[in-house]
Amino acid sequence: MVDAKELLQQALALAPEARAALAGALLESLEEAPDPEAESAWSSEIARRVCEVDAGDARLVPWEQARQTLRE
């Protein structure tokens, strides 16, 4: 059996695209099945926010400003 340290060294030797694909696959393997109620709630929330943006009711913030706020 290959140990994690050796496996990491092999993975780091891969091309960036292959490393990204491997990282994605590893993260997906840790995820549990999505909660249908949570998925439905998120879909409703996203739709509500899109409607607010489309209607001009949402206060939009440029990404640079939002990122700066998050860093502070």
Image (cartoon, rainbow, N blue to C red):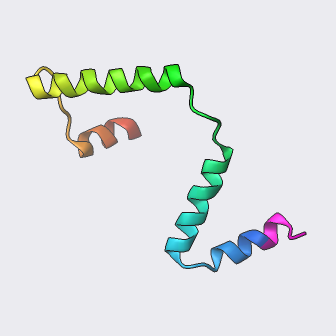
**Residue 72 in view of the camera:** no
Is 72 displayed left or right of 56 in the figure?
Answer: right
Q: Residue furthest front?
A: 36
**Residue 34 in view of the camera:** yes
Q: Which picture quadrant has residue 8?
A: bottom right
Residue 61 vertical position relative to residue 43 in the rendered view, above or below:
below
Q: Quadrant of the C terminus?
A: top left
Q: Quadrant of the N terminus?
A: bottom right
Q: Residue at x 62, y 51 (%)?
A: 27
Residue 19 x %, y %: 57, 69
Residue 60 vertical position relative to residue 7 in the rendered view, above or below:
above
Residue 65 x %, y %: 24, 40
Residue 17 vertical position relative to residue 62 in the rendered view, above or below:
below
Residue 66 x %, y %: 29, 38
Is 50 displayed left or right of 27 in the figure?
Answer: left
Magenta stretch?
A: 1-6
Residue 32 x %, y %: 65, 36
Nearer the observer, 44 or 5: 44
Q: Which picture quadrant has residue 22?
A: bottom right
Q: Which picture quadrant has residue 58?
A: top left
Q: Residue at x 52, y 24 (%)?
A: 36
Q: Residue furthest left?
A: 56
Q: Residue at x 62, y 34 (%)?
A: 33
Nearer the observer, 44 or 61: 44
